[in-house]
Image (spheres, helix red, strand yellow):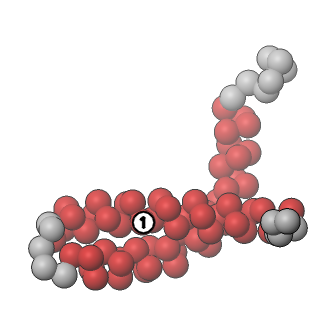
Amino acid sequence: MTRKLPPRFAPVLFALILSGLMSFMVSGIATVAAVGLAHGFFAKWITSWLLAWAVAFPGVFVLAPLVRRLVERLVDAPGGR
Protein backbone atom coordinates (compact mmCIF):
# COMPACT_ATOMS: atom_id res chain seq x y z
CA MET A 1 0.00 0.00 0.00
CA THR A 2 1.35 3.42 -1.00
CA ARG A 3 1.49 6.02 1.72
CA LYS A 4 0.36 9.51 0.80
CA LEU A 5 0.62 12.86 2.47
CA PRO A 6 -2.43 14.29 4.22
CA PRO A 7 -4.48 16.75 2.13
CA ARG A 8 -3.32 19.71 4.23
CA PHE A 9 0.11 19.43 2.58
CA ALA A 10 -1.31 19.81 -0.96
CA PRO A 11 -0.71 23.59 -1.29
CA VAL A 12 2.89 23.30 -0.07
CA LEU A 13 3.64 20.32 -2.31
CA PHE A 14 2.05 22.10 -5.27
CA ALA A 15 4.22 25.19 -4.69
CA LEU A 16 7.34 23.07 -4.18
CA ILE A 17 6.92 21.05 -7.38
CA LEU A 18 5.72 23.90 -9.60
CA SER A 19 8.41 26.32 -8.44
CA GLY A 20 11.10 23.65 -8.78
CA LEU A 21 10.15 22.73 -12.33
CA MET A 22 9.61 26.28 -13.56
CA SER A 23 12.77 27.66 -11.99
CA PHE A 24 14.74 24.70 -13.40
CA MET A 25 13.57 25.42 -16.95
CA VAL A 26 13.87 29.20 -16.77
CA SER A 27 17.29 29.18 -15.11
CA GLY A 28 18.52 26.71 -17.74
CA ILE A 29 17.37 28.95 -20.58
CA ALA A 30 18.80 32.05 -18.91
CA THR A 31 22.12 30.32 -18.25
CA VAL A 32 22.43 29.19 -21.88
CA ALA A 33 21.63 32.73 -23.02
CA ALA A 34 24.18 34.24 -20.65
CA VAL A 35 27.16 31.89 -20.97
CA GLY A 36 26.30 29.45 -23.76
CA LEU A 37 27.11 25.77 -23.52
CA ALA A 38 30.58 26.58 -22.22
CA HIS A 39 32.77 24.62 -19.83
CA GLY A 40 31.16 24.58 -16.41
CA PHE A 41 27.68 25.23 -17.80
CA PHE A 42 26.01 22.55 -15.69
CA ALA A 43 27.52 23.85 -12.42
CA LYS A 44 26.45 27.41 -13.28
CA TRP A 45 22.95 26.19 -14.16
CA ILE A 46 22.50 24.26 -10.92
CA THR A 47 23.80 27.17 -8.86
CA SER A 48 21.38 29.53 -10.62
CA TRP A 49 18.54 27.07 -10.27
CA LEU A 50 18.98 26.62 -6.53
CA LEU A 51 19.03 30.38 -6.00
CA ALA A 52 15.99 30.83 -8.24
CA TRP A 53 14.12 28.02 -6.48
CA ALA A 54 14.82 29.59 -3.10
CA VAL A 55 13.00 32.69 -4.34
CA ALA A 56 10.36 30.95 -6.47
CA PHE A 57 9.06 28.54 -3.82
CA PRO A 58 7.85 31.15 -1.33
CA GLY A 59 6.74 33.32 -4.26
CA VAL A 60 4.50 30.59 -5.71
CA PHE A 61 3.25 29.67 -2.25
CA VAL A 62 2.21 33.27 -1.53
CA LEU A 63 1.04 34.28 -5.01
CA ALA A 64 -0.96 31.15 -6.00
CA PRO A 65 -4.09 32.10 -4.00
CA LEU A 66 -3.99 35.64 -5.42
CA VAL A 67 -3.62 34.33 -8.97
CA ARG A 68 -6.50 31.88 -8.45
CA ARG A 69 -8.76 34.77 -7.35
CA LEU A 70 -7.67 36.87 -10.33
CA VAL A 71 -8.42 34.00 -12.72
CA GLU A 72 -11.83 33.51 -11.10
CA ARG A 73 -12.62 37.18 -11.82
CA LEU A 74 -11.47 36.90 -15.45
CA VAL A 75 -13.13 33.59 -16.38
CA ASP A 76 -16.83 32.72 -16.44
CA ALA A 77 -17.88 30.25 -13.78
CA PRO A 78 -18.90 26.77 -14.96
CA GLY A 79 -22.45 26.92 -16.24
CA GLY A 80 -22.11 30.59 -17.26
CA ARG A 81 -22.88 32.08 -13.85
Q: Residue furthest top?
A: 80
For the question of whether residue 27 can be seen, the reply is: yes
Q: Which residue is mark 1?
A: 24
Question: Relative to 34, is 70 above or below?
Answer: above
Decide if residue 35 is on the left or right side of residue 6: left
Decide if residue 18 is on the left or right side of residue 6: left
Q: How many marks?
A: 1
* Relative image position of residue 24 (x, y in whole percent): 42, 66
Residue 13 figure quarter = bottom right
- Viewer-proximal residue, 61 or 17? 17
Residue 72 figure quarter = top right
Which residue is found at the position 80% from the left and 24% from the top? 78
* Relative image position of residue 46 (x, y in whole percent): 36, 78
Which residue is found at the position 85% from the left and 65% from the top? 1
Question: Relative to 54, is 22 above or below?
Answer: above
Q: Quadrant of the C terminus?
A: top right
- Viewer-proximal residue, 58 or 6? 6
* Relative image position of residue 7 (x, y in whole percent): 86, 62
The kind of secondary structure element at disc 1 is: helix
Q: As shown in the figure, which amino acid type bears the numbered disc 1?
A: Phe
Decide if residue 34 is on the left or right side of residue 74: left
Q: Residues within 10 Å of mark 1 (few under 14, many from 20)?
A: some
Decide if residue 41 is on the left or right side of residue 22: left
Which residue is found at the position 71% from the left and 46% from the top? 68
For the question of whether residue 62 can be seen, the reply is: no
* Relative image position of residue 79 (x, y in whole percent): 83, 18
Which residue is found at the position 52% from the left and 67% from the top? 20
